[in-house]
Amino acid sequence: MSFGPELIWIWTRRLSSLAGRRAQRVDGVNNSALISFGSSDLLLSWGAQNCGAALISPRDKKALMASSTQTPPITNAIKSHLTGAQLCAVEQLRRDRVMRFAFQKTVGAGFTTTRHLILEVMERYSNLLLTDEDGVIIETAKHIHPADNAFRTVLPGLLYHLPPEFEGVSLEEWLAAPSSETLPKVAGFGRPLLKMLSAWEPERAAALLAGFYKDAGTEAYITQKVGKYFTALPLLLDGAEAVDEDSGRAAALAPLKDSAIEARLKKIKQHLNKEIVRRERQCADIKELLSSEGAEKYRRWGELIVANLWQIKRAEPEVLLEGYDSEGRKIEETVPIEARYSVAQNAERYFAKYKKMTSAKERAAELLVAVEAELDDLNEEYELACCMNEAADIEMMEEELGLAKMKPQKRGGAKKKETLPPHKRFEFENAIVFAGLSSKGNRYVTFRLAQPDDVWFHAQGVPGSHVILRLAATPSDEERERLYLFCASVAAYYSKARANTRQRVDHTLRKHVSAIRGGEANVTYKEFSTIIADPDEWIRETKEE
């Protein structure tokens, strides 16, 4: 995704609402800095795929902090210089993709210091710099040495210089004499945008651009994507896709959240894969033990020694003995004899080994059932993890698997609340809908939360979520159909068949569902019906609500 200086102008206008507020806290998340102004958090990101600035919610901040793998070194400098400082102004420098945040901080006896936080929003060349009132660099997210850049050096202790200026005409100059030929040379706009507008009548393009870089508000500007170019304009361009989210959040936060979710899901899948492989090896070892004939061999040797006790010489290391098996057939077998034990003691030792191995096999058979059940749960958990794309759902699974970052408990504080198995709860059309988000979550919603006459849903033939519909009152036929389609959509969405726009979903009363080990849902059910569901329908429905 690329964008031009016009979008930076819009961001500075909107972020100017923070002027007069004090920075209360500073955090670093990978290639981003978070500055808290109380109820609002300012995200400044210099990642190649997520560069930009935006106001984010506490929930978004929590999700980003949970996915953090490192704290940028510049974070400590920002924290030291800006915590407690007042934001005075937000401005765009030279109509370029550069934003400057001016902070003032009282240091004692009425003296104040000024610090500037400069964000260069230039995709892979993006950077964040902290300078003093004279423009001397205190710290920078990316150090640029002379060998890296022939135009400028960006290092602590040096004077800050802006990136090379775009050579062209100003917007005001062009508006005085609009021309399609000179439009691509207008400074302050991205070249892809100017190239698109060059195909318009000059007067029409002038009417579209005339409001930029003035004191007018930006509330009527529509955030939109044209191919890979991202912008905000007073009207929606032909072939452009409108973006509902604030342009700063869409450019900086959305890619950051996507990469954060992808990283967290990768960690969950790696953990589950490791556990699955461990259980599979454990099952293989147990099955090998159960198939072993060692126990019967020791019993047979003991019986042969007892049957031939009178003719075995103690000094012999092994002896060929004859006897009969359990079916009365004559057998002949070479049996090892330990010289340090008597012949009778050798027989006792073989019987003891037989008893021990038989007992171990019995315990192994019980253990195999438990391990195979765990393996079924882990496989189901893995498939459900592949269906997740929301931070709240991922957080629940992380807590269940012990992967969530634990906060230190205050001494003498309240006891930690019991964590419920991962599941979602919706309220829709005077009904309550539950959806399991893991194997334990599925069992929880189906066999603990659900009542006998609640309706149970599951995507047909694939691993996925158990969905429960609890009606508050008897619905009309039309209401019932809408509720069933909503629940079926949730079941299809949280299943391995999410990509199928017409997924078959089974539903029945909860009282017709019984738990079993194995199968796609780890249950068996009867007296069911099937409907066709669109996995994305429930999302559209909840947005309309």
Image: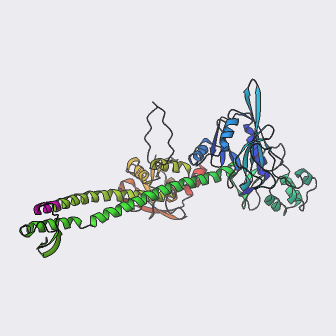
Verify whether residue 448 appears in magenta: no
* Magenta stretch, overall SS: helix
Q: Residue furthest top?
A: 109
Q: Residue furthest left?
A: 310
Residue 545 lies, in percent from the top left, at 59, 48
Residue 433 lies, in percent from the top left, at 48, 50
Give the answer, above or below, for where 388 lies relative to 86. Answer: below
Q: In the picture provided, is 289 more to the left or to the right than 464?
A: left
In percent of the image, x 45 and y 48: which residue is there? 400
Residue 192 lies, in percent from the top left, at 79, 60
Q: How many marks?
A: 0
Q: In the picture provided, is 16 more to the left or to the right than 253?
A: right
Residue extent of the magenta highlight: 341-349
- Asked whether residue 369 appears in the rendered view, the answer is yes
Residue 371 lies, in percent from the top left, at 35, 57
Query: What quarter of the picture does the N terminus occupy?
Result: bottom right
Verify whether residue 347 appears in magenta: yes
In percent of the image, x 57 and y 49: which residue is there? 67
Q: Nearer the viewer, residue 297 or 364?
A: 297
